[in-house]
C-alpha cells in the first residue's frame, strides 16, 4: 500500500482523479473546492496532462464534453452555484452517453448562499438536475479516505456505463484534513477501449457524438436505451453501509458528513442503551430503496437527518412506505448538526 | 456530335469528405457552399482520418451528417469550448467548429472569445447571415440596423436592440489569434477567395500555429424574404458595408 499522508478532502479527490488516469481537467474557481482546482493546476501539467481554468462553469463542462468525446478520462469540479451552471452540459453528456466525472463540494444555497457545508443539492444531483429524462450516478463519501476511493470508482462507473458520475461532497469534507493512504495509480493499458469515441475515422466509419434526433420515434429509442441502462445500474451498483442496525429500534438515515456525525450519535446512544443504528446510502442514485425497505420492517423509526429541508427524506419515505415512522431533522444554510443535537432528536422518537 | 463517356474528363465531383446526403438548407443559402469548401479542403489536405468537426445548434445543427469524418454535436454556443476539449485531449487531431451568428456571437460569446484568447490550435467557421434561420427569422446579434426580423418587425432599432456586432473585429484585437478573416460567397471570385481562406485556416492548425477564424458573410434568402440572386446582391452591396471583407489578422 502507498504512504500515509495528511491531506485535505479536496486534495485527495484531485490526487485520486490523477491516479485514476484523468487526462483532462477543466474548472472555474469557487469556494469551498478551490484547493481541488489548485492541486490540479500544480500537478496535471507536470504529468503532461491538460489543466484549463475555464472562462465559466458552462465552458468547463463543455470542454469535458469534448474531451470525453475524444475518449479520455476527464473531470470538472465546482460547488453548488457552479454546478447549477453545469447542468446544461451534464444533460448533454447524459444524452450523448459520455463518461465524465463531476465533483460537487456543496455549500449553502439557494442563490449565492454561503460557503459553509450543506446538502441542499440532493434533488438536483439525484433527480436529473438538467432538462430531459436522465439520471447520473451519484456517490456520497463521508470521510476523506472514502472520497479518494469513490473518486476512483466514479471514473470506473462512468466508463462502464458511458454516463456522467457525480461525486457529491460538502464543504466540510472538502476542507477537513485526515490521514489517507492514496490509491495506487491505474494502469492506463487496463482501461476499457472506447470504440465510439471521436479519435479520427481511420480504418473505420466516422463516429458521431450527439444527444438529439428530430424524429420522435428515434429519440424515443435513444431514451429507452438510456432507461434500460439505468435499470441495469439500479440492479448492479447500489452501495450503502449499515452500522449497529442488527438490534436497532430506531435508525438514522443520513449520507456524507452528516452520516459521519450521526455515527458519533450512535455511539453516544448506545452508552445510554438506546438501540440506535445508522443507514448510510453511498450511492444516492441509484438510491438503496430495497435494503432500506428491508431494514424498515425490523425497526420502529427511521429518522432522516440532512443538511437540507428534507430532500433525501423523500426517498427514505418512498423506501419505508409507512412500515415505520419517518421523522426528519434538518439543519439549513450551512449549519452543521452536532452529535448531541442528533441524539436529542433521536430521543424524541425512541422508546 | 455526342461524346462518349469514356472520353470525358471529370473536372468536378463531390468531395470524399462530403456524405452523399441531401442538405436541409434552403435554396440560395450559403451554408451548403461553405460546407462543400470545407469538405474539399479536408480532401485536399488529406486529413479526413484525423479530423473532428463540431456541429452547432441552428441551421447547421446537422453538420455532423454532411461531413464524412468524426463529428460531435455541441450545445448551443459551446462549440469552441467542445473543440478545445477535443484538441487538448488529442493534439494530433484536426479540430474545427462550425457555428452560426447566434451560436458564436450571442449565446456562445464567452466560449468564442476565450478559445480565441487562449490561442487554441483549432479552426473556427463563423457563418454570419444576420438572422436566426432555424427558429423562424428572429434578430441576430449581427442583424443590420433597420433590418426587419420576426422579433424586430419594425426594423432593428439600435436604441432598443443595440448595433450589429462585429465579432471578428473583437477577436482580432486579442493577442493570441493567428488568423482572422471575413469572407463572402456571393460570386465565383469570392468563393475562390474563401476557399483559400479555409485552406489557410486548416493549414495553420496543421502547422501548430494556433487559432484561426473564418467568418463568412452569408445569405438567408428565406428569412430575408429575397430571391437567392437578390440575396447575393444584398450581401455584396449592403451587408459588406457593415461587415467589410478581408483579413483582420494574419500572423501565420
Image (tube, coloured by chain):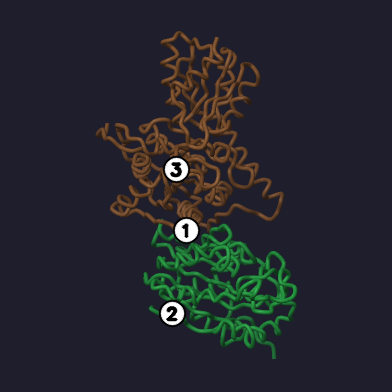
Chain colours: A brown, B green
Which residue is painted at 46% across and 81% down in the image?
A: B248
Which residue is painted at 63% across and 81% down in the image?
A: B5
- Say above or below: A147 vs A83: above
Q: Position of residue A146 (x, y in %)?
A: 39, 32
- Secondary structure of the residue carrying tag 2 is strand
Q: Which numbered circle lies on residue A115?
A: 3
Where is residue A174, by image quadrant? Answer: top left
To the question of a shared chain for discs 2 and 1, the answer is: no
Residue at mark 2: chain: B
**Dividing the image into 4 quarters, which one contains the N terminus of chain B?**
bottom right
To the question of a shared chain for discs 3 and 1, the answer is: yes
Observer-nearest residue: A307 or B131? A307
Dot 1, crowdedness within 10 Å: few (<14), some or many (≥20)? Answer: few
Observer-nearest residue: A312 or B250? A312
Which residue is painted at 53% across and 65% down in the image?
A: B109
Q: Position of residue B179 (x, y in %)?
A: 43, 76
Q: To which residue does mark 1 refer?
A: A203
Where is residue B218, by image quadrant? Answer: bottom right
> In screen coordinates, is A44 left or right of B133?
left
Q: To which residue does mark 2 refer?
A: B249
- Secondary structure of the residue carrying tag 3 is loop
**C-beta proximity under 8 Å, tags 2 and 1:** no
To the question of a shared chain for discs 3 and 2, the answer is: no
Where is residue B192, by image quadrant? Answer: bottom right
Q: Which numbered circle lies on residue A81?
A: none
Amino acid at each position: 500500500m502507498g504512504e500515509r499522508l495528511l491531506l485535505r478532502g479536496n486534495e485527495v479527490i484531485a490526487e485520486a482523479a490523477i491516479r485514476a488516469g484523468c487526462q483532462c481537467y477543466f474548472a472555474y474557481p469557487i469556494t469551498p473546492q478551490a484547493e481541488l482546482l489548485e492541486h490540479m493546476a500544480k500537478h496535471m501539467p507536470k504529468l503532461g496532462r491538460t489543466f484549463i481554468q475555464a472562462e465559466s462553469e458552462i465552458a468547463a463542462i463543455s470542454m469535458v464534453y469534448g474531451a470525453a468525446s475524444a475518449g479520455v478520462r476527464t473531470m470538472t469540479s465546482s460547488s453548488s452555484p457552479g454546478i447549477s451552471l453545469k447542468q446544461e452540459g451534464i444533460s448533454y453528456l447524459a444524452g450523448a452517453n459520455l463518461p465524465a466525472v463531476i465533483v460537487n463540494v456543496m455549500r449553502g444555497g439557494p442563490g449565492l448562499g454561503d460557503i459553509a457545508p450543506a446538502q441542499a443539492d440532493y434533488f438536483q444531483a439525484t433527480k436529473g438536475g438538467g432538462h430531459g429524462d436522465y439520471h447520473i450516478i451519484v456517490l456520497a463519501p463521508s470521510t476523506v479516505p472514502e472520497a479518494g476511493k469513490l473518486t476512483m470508482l466514479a471514473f470506473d462507473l462512468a466508463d462502464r456505463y458511458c454516463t456522467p458520475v457525480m461525486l457529491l461532497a460538502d464543504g466540510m469534507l472538502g476542507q477537513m484534513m485526515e490521514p489517507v493512504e492514496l490509491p495506487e495509480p491505474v494502469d492506463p493499458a487496463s482501461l476499457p477501449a472506447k470504440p465510439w469515441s471521436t479519435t479520427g475515422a481511420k480504418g473505420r466509419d466516422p463516429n458521431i457524438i450527439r444527444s438529439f434526433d428530430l424524429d420522435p420515434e428515434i429519440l424515443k429509442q435513444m431514451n429507452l436505451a438510456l432507461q434500460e441502462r439505468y435499470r441495469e445500474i439500479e440492479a448492479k451498483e447500489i452501495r450503502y453501509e449499515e452500522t449497529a442496525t442488527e438490534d436497532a429500534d430506531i435508525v438514522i438515515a443520513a449520507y456524507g458528513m452528516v452520516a459521519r456525525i450521526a455515527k458519533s450519535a450512535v455511539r453516544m446512544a448506545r452508552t445510554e442503551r438506546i438501540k440506535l443504528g445508522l443507514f448510510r446510502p453511498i450511492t444516492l442514485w441509484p438510491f438503496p430503496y430495497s435494503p432500506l425497505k428491508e431494514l424498515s420492517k425490523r425497526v420502529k423509526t427511521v429518522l432522516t437527518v440532512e443538511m437540507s429541508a428534507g430532500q433525501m427524506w423523500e426517498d427514505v419515505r418512498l423506501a419505508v412506505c409507512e412500515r415505520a415512522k419517518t421523522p426528519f431533522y434538518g439543519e439549513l444554510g450551512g449549519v452543521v448538526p452536532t452529535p448531541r443535537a442528533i441524539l436529542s432528536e433521536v430521543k424524541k422518537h425512541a422508546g | 456530335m455526342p461524346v462518349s463517356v469514356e472520353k470525358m474528363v471529370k473536372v468536378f465531383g463531390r468531395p470524399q469528405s462530403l456524405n452523399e446526403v441531401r442538405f436541409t438548407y434552403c435554396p440560395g443559402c450559403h451554408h451548403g457552399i461553405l460546407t462543400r469548401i470545407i469538405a474539399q479542403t479536408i480532401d485536399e489536405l488529406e486529413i479526413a482520418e484525423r479530423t473532428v468537426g463540431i456541429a452547432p445548434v441552428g441551421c447547421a445543427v446537422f453538420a455532423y451528417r454532411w461531413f464524412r469524418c468524426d463529428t460531435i454535436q455541441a450545445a448551443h454556443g459551446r462549440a469552441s469550448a467542445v473543440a478545445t476539449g477535443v484538441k487538448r485531449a488529442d493534439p494530433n487531431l484536426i479540430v474545427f467548429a462550425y457555428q452560426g451568428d447566434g451560436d458564436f456571437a450571442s449565446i456562445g460569446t464567452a466560449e468564442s472569445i476565450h478559445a480565441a484568447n487562449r490561442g487554441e490550435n483549432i479552426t473556427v467557421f463563423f457563418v454570419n447571415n444576420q438572422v436566426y434561420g432555424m427558429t423562424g427569422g428572429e434578430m441576430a446579434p449581427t442583424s443590420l440596423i433597420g433590418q426587419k426580423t420576426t422579433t424586430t418587425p419594425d426594423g432593428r432599432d439600435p436604441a432598443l436592440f443595440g448595433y450589429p456586432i462585429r465579432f471578428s473585429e473583437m477577436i482580432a484585437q486579442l493577442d493570441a489569434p493567428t488568423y482572422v478573416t471575413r469572407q463572402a460567397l456571393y460570386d465565383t471570385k469570392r468563393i475562390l477567395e474563401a476557399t483559400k481562406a479555409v485552406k489557410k485556416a486548416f493549414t495553420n492548425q496543421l502547422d501548430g500555429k494556433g487559432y484561426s477564424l473564418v467568418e463568412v458573410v452569408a445569405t438567408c434568402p428565406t428569412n430575408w424574404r429575397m430571391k437567392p440572386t437578390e440575396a447575393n446582391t444584398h450581401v455584396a452591396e449592403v451587408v459588406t458595408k457593415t461587415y467589410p471583407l478581408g483579413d483582420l489578422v494574419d500572423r501565420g
